[in-house]
């Protein structure tokens, strides 16, 4: 086994894409400034954050009490990481200066021994490192490491990088073999340590990541013993029972775990680090463990939108095929974590099965978490919403029909910022012989081998072209991911205007083109994007007898705003005659809508009756799932009964 491909630095990619550029500009121009104000408690009417003030207090620059979640520091770290990537997307000297000021405060808050966590610095210094299960010091540390590396990579500034090196060194001095045993309650530090290893070249950080991964599950009772030893709980009566070993992914070692269980975000963050380490160390056994868990998720425990974690109880995976739509949890952070996982798997083996899932997550289960105006956010991403029930009735209170402005546990909004602003890093990877294009993104990509300019009409049209300007005379391969939804008989590929037999150049979901590239070679792809009916496995009881619509990578849904009340009474015909329309006005402008003839079932007023509901013909409209809940509170469904 070898790590075939390596990641790309964000500064190599400049996105200019009809779909994604608008999304990135929304992040740089609206979301990042908005979130900065939220973190500084300057936005009336939204949940108080106090996150930056916590750092000021810890640094001795302000007086006051810690406020917020025990892991509130992570909001600042993720925001800083998002800022770092945004500076590569759109340079902003004033924003960079403000970020530098915050980094100065963080540096001042760091303790002489390298420790950095404002909750315990300000509020409970005597309890440092005593409650790894609940208090998430390692989780916050991991996010700060990611921020430090990102800021260094995009700006060249080392202050935050040095802060997180000292923090990592402090952690290494405390935990490990022949030291105090420890594992994170919320996996994340493993990701941060791996990024810190690559940024610095220091093996000790990779070694520490391996320790945290391999220590997990060696003692399934670790958190229970930790609780007994300390004699206190952070969350009181709401504390999670440390004996629930599957929830904490401590029931078995990482090599023995065969199913995705427990808290979904923690799980996929762990799998991401596992895959990262497997690739770096050419560890076949670890890769096979990752592949087993990957297969269980994508084949048995994932929503069509890419959402994972089907229950509000513990924000967790449940069992195979348990995918309720109107009670779904599907946290936005979990879908983001699946993108992280997919990208690390691609860096081991460039297989279309990984790129397909990464694409699905980007266009559906992640960006559904943000309002089109960039100022409201979903934590939970259901596939069915019914106002009056959703967000109101016990069991459904987590399923909100509209996006809130902010919330106490605000992990998802800054996570979305850092994902979308770093989009370019997911578009490509490279090996000694090959450049791999994973996503159809309009962009300019600057590599050692060539500068490649991509023009894309995706996902609304099947037109993509790659203009290659080679820097060297030596031949190399351009490997373009062809999403599995594209039918081979509709795919046409030309190189400098000459038709190429695409099928003969396909391998594992990628189109491989090898040649001595010139200074103006053009690869053009065209393909159909028909409306497709999707059926769930019959073991998914909630979806039996129903269909969902997709076009390209985009999952569609039906809202009451277009289809009237009681959308559960609507039916999709067995044979559909769908037409598409590019919406040109209103909040959904720029999105492709689907119109198709369907039926509405109308019953008598009786609660139960022997009379079959009458069927009337209606015209149905479906919208991209990611834009639902942008036109007020109304019903929404992805899966519709088939008549």
Image: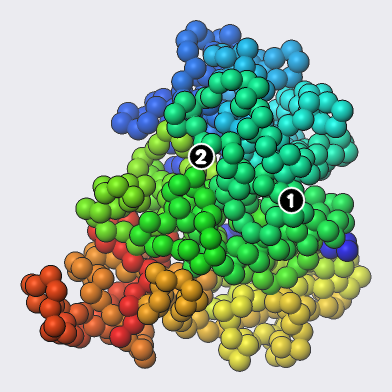
- Which of the numbered marks, if any, corresponds to residue 505? none
Q: Which residue is mark 2?
A: 411
Q: Secondary structure at mark 2?
A: loop
Residue 77 seen in the figure: no
Q: Residues within 10 Å of mark 1 (few under 14, many from 20)?
A: many
| Circle 1 or circle 2, nearest the eye | 1
Of all residues shown, which one is farthest toward the left?
605
How many marks overall? 2
Question: Which is nearer the N-term, disc 1 or disc 2?
Answer: 1
Image: 56 above or below 620: above
Q: Quadrant of residue 250?
A: top right
Residue 519 lies left or right of residue 480; in this view the side is right
Q: Nearer the viewer, residue 216 or 536?
A: 216
Distance from Cα at disc 1 to Cα at disc 2 = 25 Å
Q: Nearer the viewer, residue 200 or 382?
A: 382
Residue, x 73% and y 58% (percent of image)?
290
Residue 622 image point, x, y percent: 34, 72
Q: Nearer the viewer, residue 500 or 536?
A: 536
């Amino acid at each position: 086994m070898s790590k075939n491909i390596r990641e790309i630095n964000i500064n190599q990619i400049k996105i200019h894409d009809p779909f994604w550029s608008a999304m990135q500009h929304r992040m740089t121009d609206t979301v990042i400034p908005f979130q900065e104000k939220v973190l500084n408690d300057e936005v009336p009417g939204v949940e108080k954050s106090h996150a930056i003030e916590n750092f000021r207090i810890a640094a001795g620059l302000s007086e006051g009490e810690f406020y917020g979640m025990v892991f509130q520091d992570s909001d600042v770290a993720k925001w800083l990481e998002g800022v770092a990537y945004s500076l590569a997307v759109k340079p902003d000297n004033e924003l960079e200066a403000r970020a530098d000021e915050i980094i100065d405060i963080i540096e001042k808050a760091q303790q002489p021994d390298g420790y950095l966590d404002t909750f315990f610095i300000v509020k409970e210094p005597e309890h440092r490192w005593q409650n790894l299960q609940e208090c998430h010091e390692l989780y916050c540390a991991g996010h700060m490491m990611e921020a430090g590396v990102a800021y260094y990579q995009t700006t060249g500034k080392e202050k935050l990088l040095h802060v997180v090196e000292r923090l990592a060194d402090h952690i290494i001095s405390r935990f490990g073999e022949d030291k105090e045993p420890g594992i994170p309650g919320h996996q994340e530090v493993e990701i941060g340590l791996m990024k810190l290893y690559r940024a610095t070249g220091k093996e000790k950080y990779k070694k520490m990541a391996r320790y945290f991964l391999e220590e997990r599950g060696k003692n399934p009772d670790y958190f229970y013993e930790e609780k007994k030893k300390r004699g206190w709980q952070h969350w009181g009566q709401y504390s999670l029972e440390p004996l629930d070993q599957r929830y904490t992914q401590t029931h078995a070692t990482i090599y023995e775990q065969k199913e995705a269980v427990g808290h979904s975000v923690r799980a996929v963050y762990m799998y991401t680090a596992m895959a990262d380490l497997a690739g770096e160390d050419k560890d076949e056994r670890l890769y096979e463990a990752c592949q087993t868990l990957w297969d269980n998720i994508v084949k048995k425990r994932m929503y069509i939108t890419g959402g994972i974690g089907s229950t509000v109880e513990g924000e967790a995976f449940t069992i195979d095929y348990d995918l309720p739509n109107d009670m779904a949890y599907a946290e936005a952070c979990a879908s983001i974590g699946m993108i992280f996982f997919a990208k690390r798997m691609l860096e081991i083996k460039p297989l279309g099965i990984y790129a397909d899932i990464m694409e699905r997550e980007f266009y559906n289960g992640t960006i559904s978490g943000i309002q089109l105006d960039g100022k409201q956010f979903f934590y939970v991403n259901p596939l069915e919403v019914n106002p009056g029930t959703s967000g109101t009735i016990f069991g459904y209170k987590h399923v909100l029909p509209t996006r809130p402005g902010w919330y106490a546990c605000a992990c998802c909004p800054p996570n979305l910022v850092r994902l979308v602003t770093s989009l370019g890093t997911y578009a490509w990877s490279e090996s000694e012989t090959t450049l791999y294009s994973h996503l159809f993104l309009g962009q300019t990509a600057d590599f050692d081998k060539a500068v490649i300019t991509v023009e894309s009409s995706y996902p609304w049209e099947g037109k993509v072209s790659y203009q290659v300007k080679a820097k060297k005379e030596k031949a190399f391969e351009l490997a373009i991911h062809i999403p599995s939804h594209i039918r081979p008989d509709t795919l046409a590929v030309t190189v400098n205007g000459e038709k190429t037999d695409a099928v003969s150049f396909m391998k594992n979901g990628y189109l491989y083109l090898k040649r001595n590239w010139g200074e103006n070679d053009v690869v053009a792809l065209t393909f159909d994007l028909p409306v497709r009916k999707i059926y769930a496995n019959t073991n998914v009881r909630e979806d039996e007898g129903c269909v969902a619509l997709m076009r390209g990578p985009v999952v569609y849904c039906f809202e009451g705003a277009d289809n009237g009340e009681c959308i559960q009474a609507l039916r999709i015909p067995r044979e559909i005659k769908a037409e598409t329309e590019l919406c040109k006005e209103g909040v959904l402008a720029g999105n492709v809508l689907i119109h198709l003839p369907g039926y509405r079932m109308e019953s008598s007023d009786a609660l139960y009756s022997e009379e079959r509901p009458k069927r009337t013909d209606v015209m149905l409209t479906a919208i991209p799932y990611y834009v639902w809940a942008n036109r007020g509170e109304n019903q929404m469904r992805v899966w519709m009964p088939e008549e």
